[in-house]
């Protein structure tokens, strides 16, 4: 089943437990997938897009 819910920077930040500015920085540096939609100049991603992106990200290594 596909999740058609659109996520904002704030939603993504909550999902990966960072600040929204961190997510904005990821996008600025090309680390975030392109937005699925742009509404009124604001980018949004489908939940499935973000979950796939999170699954493909390298994991933090133990320190």
Image (spheres, rainbow, N blue to C red):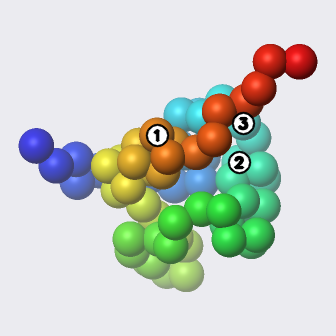
Real-space Cα distance between discs 1 and 2? 19 Å
Tell me the crowding category of disc 1: few under 14, some 14 to 19, or many 20 or more residues within 10 angstroms, Cα based: few
Quarter in which the C terminus is drawn: top right
Position of residue 42 in the picture relative to residue 26 (left or right):
left
Of labels 3 and 1, earlier in sequence is 3
Residue 50 coordinates in the image, percent (x, y)? 44, 50
The reply to whether callout 2 and callout 3 are in contact (CB within 8 Å) is: no
Of labels 1 and 2, earlier in sequence is 2
Position of residue 42 in the picture relative to residue 3 (left or right):
right
**Residue at horizontal 74%, vertical 71%?**
28
Which of pointers 1 and 2 indicates the residue nearer the eye? 1
Check the image and name the residue furthest to the right.
Answer: 63
Of residues 51 and 56, which is closer to you in this image? 56
- Kind of element beneath mark 3: loop
Circle 1 is placed at which residue position? Answer: 55
Residue 6, visible in the rendered structure: no
Residue 21, relative to residue 51: is it above or below?
Answer: below
Of residues 56 and 21, which is closer to you in this image? 56
Circle 2 is placed at which residue position? Answer: 20
- Kind of element beneath mark 2: helix
Residue 38 coordinates in the image, percent (x, y)? 45, 77
Circle 3 is placed at which residue position? Answer: 18
Real-space Cα distance between discs 3 and 1? 16 Å
Tell me the crowding category of disc 3: few under 14, some 14 to 19, or many 20 or more residues within 10 angstroms, Cα based: few
**Residue at horizontal 72%, vertical 36%?**
18
Real-space Cα distance between discs 2 and 3? 7 Å
Check the image and name the residue furthest to the left.
Answer: 1
Of residues 57 and 25, which is closer to you in this image? 57
**Residue at horizontal 53%, vertical 34%?**
15
């Amino acid at each position: 089943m596909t999740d058609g819910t659109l996520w904002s920077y704030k939603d993504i930040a909550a999902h990966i437990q960072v600040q929204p500015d961190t997510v904005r920085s990821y996008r600025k540096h090309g680390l975030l997938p392109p937005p699925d939609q742009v509404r009124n100049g604001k980018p949004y991603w489908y939940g499935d897009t973000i979950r796939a992106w999170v699954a493909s990200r390298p994991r933090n290594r133990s320190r």
